[in-house]
Image (tube, helix red, strand yellow):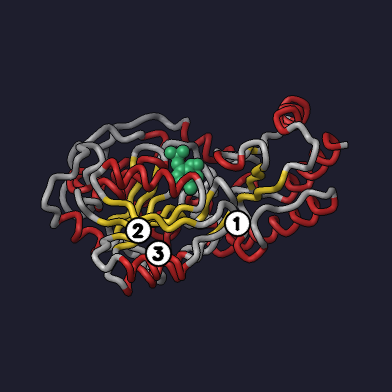
Amino acid sequence: MGPGPSDIHPRVLQAMARPTIGHLDPAFIGMMDEVKALLKYAFQTKNELTMPVSAPGSAGMETCFVNLVEPGDKVIVCINGVFGMRMKENIERFGGEAIVVADDWGTAVTPAKVEAACCAHPDAKIVAFVHAETSTGACSDAKTLCEIARKHNCISIVDAVTSLGGVELRVDDWGIDAIYSGTQKCLSCVPGISPVSFSEKALDKVRNRSSKVPSWFLDLNLVMGYWGSGAKRAYHHTAPVNTLYALHESLVMLKNEGLENAWQRHANLHQELKIGLEEIGINFVVNEAERLPQLNSVWIPEGVDDAQIRSTLLNEYNLEIGAGLGDFAGKVWRIGLMGESCKKEKVLFCVAALKAVLG
Ligand code: PLP
């Protein structure tokens, strides 16, 4: 019950153990089409370019920035935790100029600050932000932030690594242009794959670049030769065949549950966890209106030894909770309720174990 990877259903693990077939085998190509359709459902999009990048969430992040940022581009980047900082790093490495909109750790991105930055930099090309900041547990208003980006003729890049499958996320209705996620959080799949989706507007920017995408592996113009539809699929790289079996299975499970039911399950069990934790005197970092149900950041009680409690939970209760990251190291625990880890019995067990170890 940490910040991911989350628990994985046996069905997903069993799917991984199926025989490995060729990545251009007709049966595999049929499954690729299903994976794309299921990802479109999970993202709530009709974007044709919706596919899994064969590498972890950070590669999904890099896919967005390396394809969309050209040297000299001004990019407004919102930083309210570790992953906004990683976005800035990407922008600068690809020759962009990062205009930072900073918010305190543990709070959502402030739309008015983004609006002000767009007005101050009318030549900005992109607005980038993290929907669900895993380092703090804050959820930003993706719909409003994308509206602001659109109003100022900017493309939006959204990090949905922790949000996909756990909270409301509607790529088309909210006008998100480029989005990436991860498999190891609320999709409860094995780590190592990053679903991405690009709107036509974002793809136009990629197609009309004046310079080559400075990464061969992540260049969408090339990747689409394998993942695109219509045209005959051609080898680009050897797909992680068994990992994609697992992703297919976890997406089928999400579809069977229903996306909105999954969002509701995360919200309901967050409420149960909250009641249990508050009863034992543990307080939340993020105010209720901006809190992610799937990533619960709580203050470590006064006088408690962070590392010792976490190792007792791990060794004596077989329970993992997350440590604080960056500015929150040693101050905060992060309790994940993601996908398969978001079950009533696990919430009750977690509260009981914490109560026992805290005495
Ligand atoms: N973005 C967010 C919000 C994350 O939580 C993570 C990982 O925890 C990443 C990006 C990077 O994903 P990965 O560790 O799979 O590369």
Q: Amino acid at mark 1?
A: Leu
Name the residue nearer the viewer: 286 or 267: 286
Residue 73 circle label:
none
Which quarter of the figure is the N terminus placed in?
Answer: top right
Could one spot residue 221 in this view of the protein? yes
In terms of image quadrants, where is residue 179?
bottom left
Instruction: Reply above or below: 168 against 325.
Output: below
Q: Outermost residue, top direction?
A: 315
Alpha carbons under labels 3 and 2: distance apart: 20 Å
Give the x, y percent position of residue 73.
23, 55
Circle 1 sits in a helix, a strand or a loop, which is it? loop
- Check disc 2 and report the residue beneath it: 76
Circle 3 sits in a helix, a strand or a loop, which is it? loop
Q: Amino acid at mark 2?
A: Ile
Residue 292 circle label:
1
Give the x, y percent position of residue 145.
42, 67
Give the x, y percent position of residue 11.
55, 40
Q: Residue at x 26, y 46 (%)?
A: 66
Q: Comparing marks 3 and 2, which lies closer to the viewer?
A: 2
Q: Residue at x 17, y 40 (%)?
A: 234
Quick one: label 3 or label 1, which is nearer the N terminus? 3
Q: Residue at x 41, y 33 (%)?
A: 242
Give the x, y percent position of residue 314.
71, 29
- Check disc 3 and report the residue beneath it: 171
Q: Outermost residue, right direction?
A: 359
Left or right: residue 9 versus residue 250 is: right
Quick one: label 1 or label 2, which is nearer the N terminus? 2
Name the residue nearer the viewer: 270 or 237: 270
Q: Outermost residue, bottom direction?
A: 151
Label 2 crowd (10 A; few <14 / some 14-19 / many >=20): many
**The residue at label 2 has a CB less than 8 Å from ligand 1:** no
